[in-house]
Amino acid sequence: MRGTSEIITEMQYLPPVSRVALLQCYSKIIIDTQEPFRKSTWRNRCMIIGVNGPILLTVPVDGGRSVKKLSKDVRITYREKWQRNHWRSISSAYRGSSYFAFYEDKFCPFYEKKFEFLLDLNFELMELCIDLLHLDSIFSIDNNSETVEGHIDHINDVEKRNSNYQYQQVFEDRHGFIAGASVIDLLFNLGPEAKNHLIRLSLSHKNPP
């Protein structure tokens, strides 16, 4: 089930499964580019699950932890080889999963192309995920601060309430299920079944226990 409403939210780097499940309930998703960039959030980091447990991957940004800019103005820095490190970590974590080989060629180019702005990297990665998940949501970018201020829909509290809905993970026999992983964890583990999982999770958002 999905509504016809719209939601405004920040753009995240390969966001958690629970975030994507909630977003797909909306027919239109508007990205707020006027919000102040907040450090230590999913805006420039994601979590994957490796053989030793959770791994945080962070996209370094110009200005580091002291950056004070709007999200649309945050630039990626390439002083360190983060693309190589991210892709090596992703490959190592999911090489043994059921569907990594199926999606590998889709994601690899993002770790070779040098994006100037974090927003562009996140937006294009999210478009790819939406396409691979066969979701119908339409993404758009809103640079009008008045529009954003008038229509903000806060989703973080609802998302946190339902972040523990489980599915089979590649290293679950070692660690048990680990909540909060990136949507790529879902894709690489479930493949075409990932969409159905998101639908079940979105229903739990609407009907919390």
Image (spheres, rainbow, N blue to C red):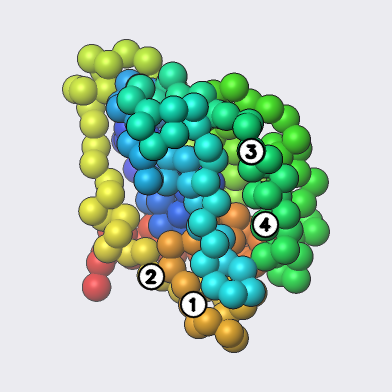
Whether residue 209 is situated above or below residue 195 in the rendered picture:
below
Label 4 CA crowd tier, 10 Å (few <14, some 14–19, many 20+): many
Q: The residue under label 1 is which amino acid type?
A: Phe
Q: Which one is nearer the viewer's eye here, 23 or 3?
A: 23
| Image marks 2 and 1: residues in contact by CB distance under 8 Å | yes
Q: The residue under label 3 is which amino acid type?
A: Glu
Find the distance from the CA under tag 2 to the CA under tag 4.
22 Å
| Image location of residue 132, percent across then percent down | 65, 47
- The residue pinned by badge 3 equals 80
- The residue pinned by badge 1 equals 177
Q: Secondary structure at mark 3?
A: loop
Find the distance from the CA under tag 3 to the CA under tag 2.
34 Å
Of labels 1 and 3, the one closer to you: 3
Q: Which one is nearer the viewer's eye here, 45 or 26?
A: 45
Find the distance from the CA under tag 4 to the CA under tag 1.
18 Å
Pick out the residue farthest to the bottom: 173
- The residue pinned by badge 2 equals 164
- Which residue is at 25% across, 67% downward? 208
Looking at the image, how many numbered discs can be counted on the residues?
A: 4
Q: The residue under label 2 is which amino acid type?
A: Asn
- The residue pinned by badge 4 equals 90
